[in-house]
Image (tube, rainbow, N blue to C red):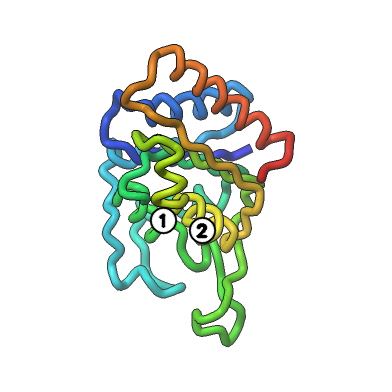
Amino acid sequence: MNISIILGHPSSGSFNHAIADAARDFFAGRGDRVFYHDLYAERFDPVLPAGEIPRDGRVDAAIGAYCDELALSDGIVIVHPNWWGQPPAILKGWVDRVVRPGVAYAFEEADGGEGVPRGLLRARFAAVFNTSNTPEARERDVFGDPLELLWKNCIFDLCGVTRFYRTMYRVVCTSTPVERAAWLDEVRSILGGMLGGEAR
């Protein structure tokens, strides 16, 4: 299998990095081909130029390589912190530039973009792992769950990836090494379930 792992966190010592590394090691241990991208380490440019917006817009070689990997992926893993109910800007820019028409979705003939797109991604599943310092009750009662809507409804469902799982690890700033080790075990278990079981 081909697996894309996309990490959006600026600190190399973050728990997000530990999650992404655990996912990479899990799939590599199975013999899968892993496309691993630490967007900050790679200095990914999140700014979408106007010329890239159209379906036939010209993309540079670096963005084209990201697009090719996404199109080839049988599974997608996204790892990022919850910042203001959103992914970090660098990861949102990756979505803007890589999850693009002709790669991840297409509109039907004569549709000018006002309709519902047809998903093109071949990925069998997508898993999103988030971290937060907001307690679950406050997140749910005050803010709702904007990341679930973003990744599941607004991105993966529209791109044809209907087997989806997302979880939030919290409260990271007060977590213990024992808790973090258990969370990483859970990450591995979730990924194993995505390969063989049903997702919500």
Horizontal placement of 10 versus 86: left or right? Answer: left
Picture coordinates of residue 143, whole percent (x, y): 40, 51
Quarter of the image that includes the C terminus: top right
Name the one closer to the observer, 43 or 193.
193
Outermost residue to the top: 178
Disc 2 or 1, which lies upstream in sequence? 1
Picture coordinates of residue 65, whole percent (x, y): 43, 50
- Residue 109 is marked as none
Residue sitting at 45 percent across and 39 percent down?
137
Quarter of the image that includes the N terminus: top right
Name the one closer to the observer, 16 or 124.
16
The reply to whether residue 4 is visible in this rendering is no
The residue that disc 1 covers is: 95
Picture coordinates of residue 142, whole percent (x, y): 40, 50
Q: Is residue 104 above or below residue 51?
A: above
Q: Amino acid at mark 2?
A: Ile
Residue sitting at 28 percent across and 67 percent down?
49
Graded by Cα atoms within 10 Å as few (under 14), some (14 to 19) or many (20 or more), the crowding at tag 1 reads some
Residue mark closest to the camera, 2 vs 1: 2
Dot 2 and dot 1 residues touching (CB under 8 Å): yes
- Residue 155 is marked as 2
Picture coordinates of residue 193, whole percent (x, y): 68, 32
Outermost residue to the bottom: 110
Instruction: Quadrant for residue 110, please give it.
Output: bottom right
Graded by Cα atoms within 10 Å as few (under 14), some (14 to 19) or many (20 or more), the crowding at tag 2 reads some
At mark 2, the secondary structure is helix
Instruction: Quadrant for residue 198, please give it.
Output: top right
Q: Is residue 122 above or below residue 189?
A: below
Q: Amino acid at mark 1?
A: Val
